[in-house]
Amino acid sequence: MLRRVSVEKASITQISDEYGVSRPTFYQARTDFEQGGI
């Protein structure tokens, strides 16, 4: 999900719909990943 936005340049709205998560959930996941990695 995060890779599709950063590498493939997919829109956050599109990815949120595809993965069934809200946009705030996407942003939280991205923040968590940036701070702590995998």
Image (spheres, rainbow, N blue to C red):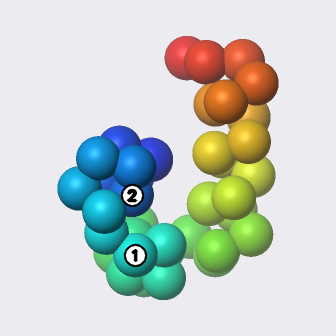
Number of disc labels? 2
Q: Quadrant of the C terminus?
A: top right
Name the residue: 31% across, 62% down: 9
Kindly identify which numbered label has been placed on residue 11.
1
Spatial CA distance of label 2 from label 1 is 6 Å
Assign a secondary structure to mark 1.
loop
Q: From the viewer's perspective, is residue 9 above or below residue 37? A: below
Question: To which residue does mark 2 refer?
Answer: 5
Kindly identify which numbered label has been placed on residue 21.
none
Residue 25: image location, x then y, percent? 70, 62
Amino acid carrying mark 1 in the image: Ser
Tell me whether circle 2 and circle 1 mark residues in contact (CB < 8 Å): yes
User: 31 left or right of 22?
Assistant: right
Q: Nearer the viewer, residue 37 or 22?
A: 37
Amino acid carrying mark 2 in the image: Val
Is residue 9 visible in this depiction of the protein? yes
User: 31 left or right of 33?
Assistant: right
Q: From the viewer's perspective, is residue 4 above or below residue 33? A: below
User: 7 left or right of 26?
Assistant: left
Is residue 20 visible in this depiction of the protein? no
Q: Residues within 10 Å of mark 1 (few under 14, many from 20)?
A: few
Name the residue: 76% across, 24% down: 35
Residue 22: image location, x then y, percent? 64, 75
Assign a secondary structure to mark 2.
helix
Q: Quadrant of residue 26?
A: bottom right
Residue occupying the far left of the picture: 8
Name the residue: 56% across, 70% down: 21
Q: Which mark is first along the chain, 1 or 2? A: 2
